[in-house]
Amino acid sequence: GAGVSQSPSNKVTEKGKDVELRCDPISGHTALYWYRQSLGQGLEFLIYFQGNSAPDKSGLPSDRFSAERTGGSVSTLTIQRTQQEDSAVYLCASSPQRGGGTGELFFGEGSRLTVL
Amino acid sequence: QQQVKQSPQSLIVQKGGISIINCAYENTAFDYFPWYQQFPGKGPALLIAIRPDVSEKKEGRFTISFNKSAKQFSLHIMDSQPGDSATYFCAASIAGYALNFGKGTSLLVTP
């Protein structure tokens, strides 16, 4: 497809389990972002990848969160030992380049994570 | 710390009315101020954006007003339509990098 693709769209897991969320950015986009959207909390920046540079991990809330981007394309966000407060929609966005000139981010539809 | 403060949290407007959403920021280094629109079950999508060298930008029924001295900017939706019902996020960043989003405004336009 032409847009950012995320999977799974919905994930229900038990507290303490690990989860992996996948993002396929728009082809050719060098920048990739992960955001977390919690009810009433807006969009929280998690991590940023730009080309082959070291990622900006400054938004990751704890060391249970990690992300990687393979081959400058697909990215996986991993949450270890999930907690109920991790329940949220995790949004991936890509951009043609840093700032994209316009700074426009193209978002996927998100992965809704529910931790029981 | 919330770098961009957005209000109101929710807004109900009659069809044909004007919807106004306000945002304020502290970091004077911010140089890019977009608004994103999000429909239920979808990701946010860029609606309109402004840079601080202009005080107003208009695209169709949507206008951003920017007040650099007050560190405030707002979105005006003229002739609001039921199809405009969505959540709106303001954001700010330096050179478009790592957007800092407001908490969002849920807009409902009644017929």
Image (tube, coloured by chain):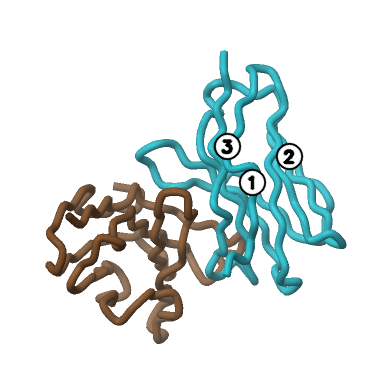
Chain colours: A brown, B cyan
- Provide the residue designation for mark 2: B63
Question: Who is closer to the viewer here, A94 or B13?
Answer: B13
Q: CA distance from mark 2 to mark 3?
A: 19 Å
For marks 2 and 1, the one nearer the N-term is 1
Q: Quadrant of residue A61?
A: bottom left
Q: Are marks 2 and 3 on the same chain?
A: yes
Chain letter behind tag 1: B
In the rendered structure, are the residues bearing label 2 and label 1 in contact, judged by CB atoms less than 8 Å apart? Answer: yes
Which quadrant does the C terminus of chain A fall into? bottom left
- Provide the residue designation for mark 1: B48
Left or right of residue A7, residue B2 in this image: right
Q: Secondary structure at mark 3?
A: strand
- The residue at 73%/46% (across/down) is B74
Farthest residue to the bottom: give it. A54
Question: Who is closer to the viewer here, B43 or B11?
Answer: B11
Counting from the top left corner in percent of width and height, residue A60 is at 38, 75
Using a 10 Å C-alpha cutoff, classify the residue at mark 3 as few (fewer than 14 neighbours), some (14 to 19) or many (20 or more).
few
- Provide the residue designation for mark 3: B10
Q: Quadrant of residue A15?
A: bottom left
